[in-house]
Amino acid sequence: MEEYIISLMQQLPIVALFAVILATLLMLGKGADLLVDEAVTLSVKWGIPKILIGATIVSLGTTLPEASVSVMAAVRGNPDLALGNAVGSIICDTGLIVGIAALISPLALNKKLVNRQGWLQFFSGLLLIAVSIPLVSVLKGGIGVITSSGNARIPQYIGFIFLGLLVVYMIITVRWSKDSGGKIEESIEKIDESKIFVVLLKLSAGVALIILSSKILIPTVEVTALRAGIPDSIIAATLVAFGTSLPELVTAVTAARHGHGDLAVGNIIGADILNVLFVVGAAAAVTPNGLPIPGYFFHLQFPAMMIILLVFRLITLFAKKEIKRIHGVILLAMYVAYTVISYTTI
């Protein structure tokens, strides 16, 4: 199937290729929506606490597009796309999405929760970089050796460790939510047994859409990158990352418009953590030889990620009650600068 898709895409003009990418990203988002909605419906039916649903199913569901794309890319042996999508999504979530949401309306902060989760967000980024640097290279001379030799990779066992940390993070999140008296609101109506089949059918359709759209998206990005002379990682870290971050964008903008800034900020922080533990973890776990990291990630992608995470952390630390519009302008400007640099330093 993949060979057929590649052959088909090679016959299309580059404008049509970008159209296919956008269409498959929309399919990916719709599949994730279906999967989350029906999973929540079943969970309510089976009596699972709402707070547990919000901290696990819903939060994992919003990062499913990133995870599916990165895992499929890793399986196909395309680490640029697999890692670029995860790192780019963190940059997009923190810069573009928080920036837009803050411009719409200042975002209220739950200082206690944001400070706890915010440090996890920042250190998850540092953790990703730390596991990307092989100890032998550090002993031989540091990052310069890595970027020149190109031997940096995230071992498969680190992927499984990340997935284990993901479970720990979910448990901690549920406990923190309970301590803060948080409640996960949803408007799922009670369903009778006769409708369970319909729910399962929709659930299966969501899974099928995610898998199908990912299988179309990845070879299309590869063909587009080759045709346009743009590295896979750049397209993955910008266009694909933006598309897979649409669930977070919609959630943040809706929350900002209705005055629920704390929900928007919390969703972004959680998504960034999951991009490391879930997305990168799953992608590394399916690669027996580890997830290779191109040397230029240490020149642009990783520094950009940490700079924007640091600025966001400082904003949330020193902001008294809310992320103001001026903060949104700063974050948005940083994202624009990152995108411009990405395409002008090819």
Image (cartoon, rainbow, N blue to C red):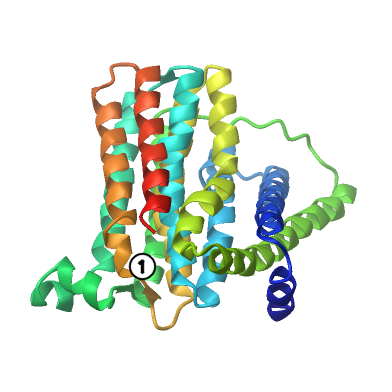
Crowding at label 1, few (<14), some or many (≥20) Cα neighbours within 10 Å? few
Q: Is residue 339 above or below residue 257?
A: below
What percent of the width, then of the height, locates residue 134? 22, 74
Say which residue label 1 marks.
161
Judge by depth and name the residue closer to the eye, 143 or 122. 143
Count all numbered tags in the image, as a single digit. Answer: 1
What percent of the width, then of the height, locates residue 178? 44, 34
Of the 4 image quadrants, the one containing the N terminus is bottom right
Left or right for 163, reference 235: left
| Residue most extreme to the right | 194
User: Under tag 1, what secondary structure?
Assistant: helix
Which three-letter amino acid code belongs to the residue tagged 1?
Ile
What percent of the width, then of the height, locates residue 183? 53, 30
Which residue occupies 45% across, 62% down? Answer: 233
Dividing the picture into quadrants, the one containing residue 310 is top left
Left or right for 43, reference 63: right
Task: Judge whether residue 318 can be spotted in this image.
Answer: yes
Which residue occupies 35% across, 36% down? Answer: 334
What percent of the width, then of the height, locates residue 294? 35, 70
Judge by depth and name the residue closer to the eye, 334 or 123. 334
Dividing the picture into quadrants, the one containing residue 7 is bottom right
Which residue occupies 50% across, 77% down? Answer: 77
Dividing the picture into quadrants, the one containing residue 128 is bottom left
